[in-house]
Image (tube, grey):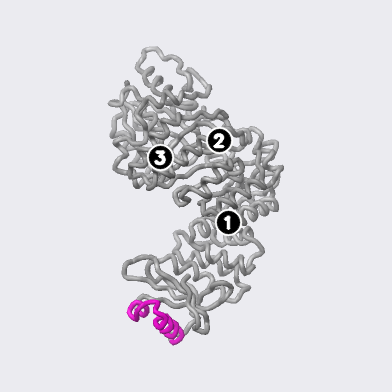
Amino acid sequence: MKKTLLTTCNAKYIHKNLALRWMYVTCPDKEQVLLREFIIKDDSSQIVAEILKMEVEVVCFSCYIWNIELIKQLMKMLKQRKPTVHIVLGGPEVTYESYDLLEQGADAICIGEGEKCIWEYINMLDSKIPYEIKGMYTKAFPNTEYQRVDLRWLETFENPYFLDMDKGQMKNRYLYLETSRGCPYSCAYCLSSADNCVRMFSEEYVISLLSKIAESEVIQVKFLDRTFNSNPKRALRLARYINEHCTHQIFQFEVVAETLSEELLDFFTKEADVSRFRFEVGVQSFNSKTLASVGRIQNNQRLQEVIQRMRDAGCILHVDLIAGLPYEGMDSFHKSFNSLFALKASELQLGILKLLKGTRLKQEREQYHLCAQKTAPYDVISTEWLTNKELLALHACADAVEKFWNSGVAQDSINIMLERKWFKDPFTLFLQLGEQYLLLPRPYQPHQLFQCFFPILKNYDKCEVDAVLLMSYYKKFKQKPHRFTDVWMTQLEKKQVLQFALEQGIANQKELFCYGLVDVGYKDNEFGYQLVLYNMYQKLPKRWFVDKNLIKIEEI
């Protein structure tokens, strides 16, 4: 067998490519195989130099929307430096409509799951006369039949999760775990709908993996299953096992919330340790016509009820919407955003529709006047219902949600602003915040992020605005940070607050006067002062609210 490199460019170091590891363990001749991962921020010339040093004859790239443009560049550079190198592409980004890549440096493209056909193809390269391999698209044999492998067959190999090459990094990287392949749903925008056939690894196999995870140094486990609760009874048994045995790990699942069985819902809300489970809930829209157009069956009332119950139980929920779907204009999206925000999930993601290769929605794009980028990630740039300008505004709004809300940077302040009705609704706030975020210099300092609020709150009392912003700002630092607001207190007033705190036994004189910071603050509809007490141990500070009359002091 020819010497082969399995490689990819991950989005971040903490990510690991499970597909490459499955390829590695199913290889019939591991002595001839290397596995090396890069990240998309790596210099392309350096990546090529490292690959050439390995002196391999075949390079297999795992391709996704976030790395395909870089991989195209790497292919071209490799072929220029070493024309004899054989390049094979695989992964969701090249499985459909990517045959032009054979003109850009690729020698073959894997269509579907490659654990068998890749190795059959590489063995075929040693043959004097080429022959067809199912699942491998080449100029000589343009085979487009999607390949699926038998999961029971995969179970006979060494599992790909605890390879020697990974053991030293287990606690610093995600462990991506798949207990099934395929999706039971047919959402027109999702590539998983193209494989509308759910296959599951045996429960015994999954339990054996979970037992190894329980004993490992792994911290974060992300299930790759498209719908963890597609088989409710099986999902409940796995969740119970995780809750009982995997006590040092955090597990993340994708679930269809409105189809969660009452048994599963009761387990997660009444029995499970909610700190160890995170749930991704794809809501996408609350517009019934929009949902119907993309083949998404969703009981909005049940969905909202389930999210509410899970949130009330303390479950960590990541919910998302997609902007750019059919029949959803600015007004409709405005309503969807506010409806979802009102459920107060832990994180809210605003995504932009992507017209992915192989999806029904891409095929129907003319029907809906969907115009998208020609290159990855194929974001929609205008629709019949949203102009290009509106979608650009939603892009900025999405950035604002990520930077100010999901990051936790300004959640406290934003909640106060909405409580005081400084904005008519959350969507209006984030839309305006997005405009300001675009104007920031790059890179920017933490305090500059907070200054984005000033232009959109210019009609309100500046002292009150500063007090609200500082409720989020000071808590994020381990030592006194850069000041960005006006000065609203005299040194005498600050000293009086510190003295009051001393008299109330909050801390000793040295701690208060060396590490204490006093500024304007807000709590429970009352403006007053906040006392922030930093420390010599570089730990996050403790904070107290003090009323203006120096009568009460309450820890925040």
Which residue is depicted at the point 36% across and 44% down?
Answer: 218
Q: Nearer the viewer, residue 306 or 100?
A: 306
Tag 1 secondary structure: loop
Mark 2 residue type? Ser
Of the image marks 3 and 1, the number of the one nearer the N terminus: 3
Q: Give yes or no for residue 289 being in the magenta stretch.
A: no
> Vertically, is 535 above or below 438?
below
Highlighted range, magenta: 492-513
Q: In the visual, does 101 lie left or right of 507?
A: right
In the image, is 497 to the left or to the right of 366? left
Q: Residue 494 sits in which quadrant?
A: bottom left
Q: Residue 230 bears which disc, if any?
A: 2
- Image point (56%, 69%), residue name: 454
- How far from the left and from the top, in percent, is residue 278? 49, 48
Question: Spatial distance from mark 3 to mark 1, Cα to Cα?
Answer: 35 Å
* Residue 517 visible, this orientation: yes
Secondary structure under tag 2 reads helix
Q: Between marks 2 and 1, how big is the CA–CA gap?
A: 25 Å
Query: Furthest residue to the bottom?
Result: 492
| Other-residue count near label 1 (Cα within 10 Å), few / some / many at <14 / 14–19 / ≥20 | some
Quarter of the image with the N terminus in it:
top left
Q: Amino acid at mark 1?
A: Lys
Q: Nearer the viewer, mark 3 or mark 1?
A: 1
Query: Could you say where residue 183 lies in the image, as x and y percent from the top left?
Result: 55, 33
State the image coordinates of residue 87 (x, y, percent, origin top left): 40, 28
Q: Which residue is mark 3?
A: 9
Residue farthest to the top, as pictured: 129
**Of the pair 421 and 277, the residue shown nearer to us:** 277
Q: Is residue 506 magenta?
A: yes
In three-dimensional space, the C-alpha distance between marks 3 and 2, rounded to whole angstroms, equals 31 Å
Question: For numbered disc 3, what is the local secondary structure?
Answer: strand
Can residue 76 be seen here? The reply is no
